[in-house]
Amino acid sequence: MAIVITVAQQKGGTGKTTLAANLAAALAPSRRVALLDIDPQHSLTRWNQLRPKTAAKLTFSDVSGWRVTGELDRLKAAHDVVVIDSPPQIDTDARLAIRGANLVLIPIQPSPPDIWAAEGTLKLAATEKRRAAMVLNRVPPSGKLRETITAQLQRDGKPLLTATIGNRTGFATAFAEGLAVTETAPRSTAANELRALLTELLERIG
C-alpha cells in the first residue's frame, strides 16, 4: 500500500503546487509515483500536460468531490507513493485528502500571515488524527525573518521540518517545462534542498 503525502495550505501563494510536483518527480525514478490534483485551479494538471515524454513516468489523475476517496484508493493499490495537491481552502475535498494521508505537508513562507493560515490545516490534520509537518518554503536569501519565524514556531511547539526551500528561480523555470528542479538542474542548490526535504519527509513517515 502506498505512502500518501498531502500538500495542504489554505492560503494561496505558498508554493503548494510547485512543491507537490517537485516531490513527485524527484521520487519517480526510483518508485511508482502517482500525482492526484484536487485543487480547482488545476495548475498541476497544466504542469503534467507540459511534461516531456522522456521524463520519469508519473501516473496523473485529477478528480474532485465524491470521486476523491475511490480514486485515492485505486492509486494507493498500484503505487508506492501518492502525492496530493489539495485545494487552497478547508473544504470537503481538502478534508478527504488529509484523511487519506500518511503525512500532511504544510508549506509556509516565513511570514506571520502564512503561519496564521496554517493553523486551520494543522487543526484539521489533528481532527483527522494525521501527522502534519510544516516546511519553510520560498525563503528569501537574506534577512533575519527566517530565524525569527523558526524560533517562534519552535517556541510554540509546531511540527517544523529542519529542511527549508529557498526562493529560487530554478523551481519556476522547471515547472514551466513540466519538470522538477532535480530534472533540469540536478546539481543545483535548489535540487539539493528538495532532496533534503524529501529525505526528512520519508524518515518521518517511516
Image (cartoon, rainbow, N blue to C red):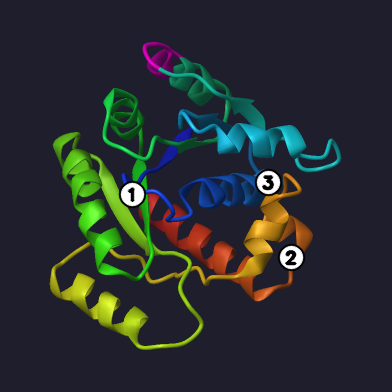
Q: Is residue 48 above or below residue 68?
A: below
Instruction: Kindly identify which residue carries mark 3.
Output: 30
Which residue is painted at 68% across and 46% down in the image?
30
Q: Which mark is residue 11?
A: 1
SS of the residue at dot 2? loop
SS of the residue at dot 1? loop
Q: Can residue 3 be seen from the camera position used here?
A: yes
Depth check, mark 2 against mark 3: the one in front is 2
Q: Position of residue 24 (x, y in %)?
A: 59, 44
SS of the residue at dot 3? loop
Mark 3 Cα shell of 10 Å, populated few (<14), some (14-19), many (≥20): few
Please tell me whether residue 69 belongs to the stretch shown in magenta: yes
Which residue is painted at 76% across and 38% down in the image?
50
Seen from the viewer's position, the closer of residues 81 and 22 is: 22
Range drawn in magenta: 65-70
Residue kind at label 1, given as amino acid type: Lys
Q: Which mark is residue 176?
A: none
Residue kind at label 2, given as amino acid type: Pro
Q: Is residue 70 above or below residue 104?
A: above
Q: Position of residue 48 (x, y in %)?
A: 68, 35
Residue kind at label 3, given as amino acid type: Ser
Q: Is residue 99 left or right of residue 190?
A: left
Q: Can residue 206 be seen from the camera position used here?
A: no
Q: Is residue 125 left or right of residue 69?
A: left
Depth check, mark 1 against mark 2: the one in front is 1
Please tell me whether residue 84 belongs to the stretch shown in magenta: no
Q: Position of residue 9 (x, y in %)?
A: 34, 47
Seen from the viewer's position, the closer of residues 146 and 204 is: 146
Instruction: Kindly identify which residue carries mark 2.
Output: 186
Q: State the image quarter where residue 98 is shown.
A: top left
Depth check, mark 1 against mark 3: the one in front is 1
